[in-house]
Image: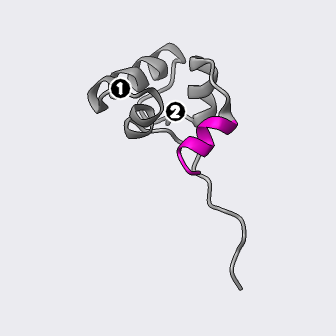
Amino acid sequence: MKSTSRNLRSAIYPKDAAIITGKSLRSAGRLVLKIRTDLKKGSHQLLTIGDFCNYMGLDTKEILLKLNL
């Protein structure tokens, strides 16, 4: 029996940030690092899509659609 629900990942990576913002991969990596630093995330903690959207002032649903998640 197949599951009809999609597996949603909650972490956002520099490649995702590059797709969303239109920046280069390197610039997107710096942006993700800046957001993690500003939110006081530890080096072992991931940046969630919700954290990214709140920080950037974006709608989470639109971002999930853009990333095909």
Q: Check the image and name the residue furthest to the left.
A: 26
Residue at the spot x=49%, y=38% of the render? 12
Residue that numbered label 1 is attached to:
23
Is residue 19 or residue 38 the one in the foreground?
A: 19
Q: Residue at 54% across / 18% down in the picture?
A: 39
Q: Is residue 17 left or right of residue 5?
A: left
The answer to whether marks 1 and 2 mark residues whose Cβ atoms lie closer than 8 Å is no
Residue 48 screen position, x and y as percent: 57, 35
How much space separates mark 1 and mark 2, taking CA atoms?
Answer: 18 Å
Q: Amino acid at mark 2?
A: Leu
Q: If the image is split into quadrants, where does the N terminus sit?
A: bottom right
Task: Specify start and end residues of the magenta stretch as a single range.
Answer: 61-69
Secondary structure predominantly adopted by residues drawn in magenta: helix
Residue 38 numbered mark, or none: none
Q: Which residue is mark 2?
A: 47
Question: Which residue lies at the image location 35% right of the left edge and 26% below the top edge?
Answer: 23
Q: Is residue 1 left or right of residue 55?
A: right
